[in-house]
Amino acid sequence: MFRPGRARRTTSGAALAVAAVAVPLLSACTGPLSTLDAAGSGAQRIAGLFIVMATVATAVWLFVAGAAVYAARKTPQDNGVRAGHKLIVFGGILLPLLLLGALSYSGLRQANELLEPGDGLVISVTGERWWWRVRYAAPSAPAVVSANEIRMPLGERVEFRLASTDVIHSFWIPSLGGKTDMIPGRLNRLVLEATREGRFRGACAEFCGLSHALMEFDVVVMSPGGFREWLEHQASDARAPSDRVATRGQQLFMQNGCGACHRIGGTSAEGRIGPDLTHVGGRHSIAAGTLPVEPDAIAAWISHPSAVKPGALMPPFSMLGADDLRAIGAYLEGLE
């Protein structure tokens, strides 16, 4: 027997179930690693292509579901052999060929547009275990070396040259554009144009070892004028420490051989193995997006790098006391 009250409760339960699934899905459309919260021309094209593909997929699903319902209501005697052949030819061959061909053409055409020449600024990014080496080359400006953070001007097409020194990595800034693999012995290109100022997040999108999940970086989109000023400042030497603790930290940094792996402009530290630390205090994080730029966090990283990032190639300096480690952290934090 049909019971209206029970039907209403069933409908309400279904609606709540749909809402419970839809709310988390919709909330995932925003955030620092969202592909649908587009802040770049490339990401906008990719998001548009996704919407088209999702719409086509939904239409195909509805067609197939409708055909299944129709077939379930019919008997073999209702349709002849000729009708079955037409359904196979048109629904199973021609329609998929047209849809897949149109989607493939659209995707390939947009991929070519994402590789059009940039406006002059070239940012070379090299993936290493497990951090990012970054080099800026702009017209009429000195080359700048940095690490684990990328800054780019608003509204300019920037060419990224991507490489790797060890294993396959994948460079991805979801809010700005698509991902591109970084393959040892090969140089790949990607052109991105930011359409909104702000701070975004990038990540390695290819499993590369123990600390793959801890290999991220910040992306700061600035006004063109602000970016030029920042680039000029990055080309300058590090400023001298201004207080007693930071001065002691600089002495400890040099005495303990840190300069063999790291460079700090204007000092005797000229290492090229690890990240350039000339202006590390002006970045938003250290250890490839793992820790904030604070003395305690820097001290923890120097003392036991592999405890923070498993497999890190930096040797531990646990033989240093807590005060010495904090002094080095204070020195590096002041390198803005």
Image (tube, rainbow, N blue to C red):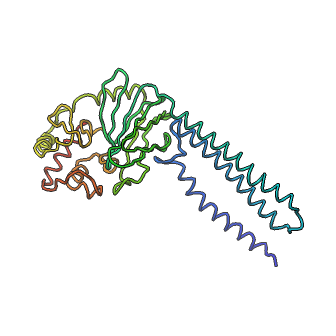
* In the image, residue 177 above or below residue 68: above
Residue 122 can be seen, yes or no: yes
Percent position of residue 324, x then y = 13, 50
* In the image, residue 22 above or below residue 125: below
Foreground residue among 211 and 251:
211
Percent position of residue 186, x then y = 39, 40
Residue appearing at x 16%, y 50% in the figure: 325
**Which of the image's four quarters has the C terminus?**
top left
Percent position of residue 228, x then y = 36, 26
Residue 296 can be seen, yes or no: no
Where residue 15 sits, quadrant-wise, is: bottom right
Percent position of residue 62, x then y = 73, 56
Foreground residue among 22 and 53:
53
Foreground residue among 40 and 158:
158
Farthest residue in the top direction? 140
The mark total stands at 0
Q: Is residue 276 left or right of residue 5?
A: left
Farthest residue in the bottom direction? 1
Residue appearing at x 73%, y 52% in the figure: 93
Residue appearing at x 33%, y 23% in the figure: 141
Q: Is residue 255 left or right of residue 85?
A: left
**Which of the image's four quarters has the N terminus?**
bottom right
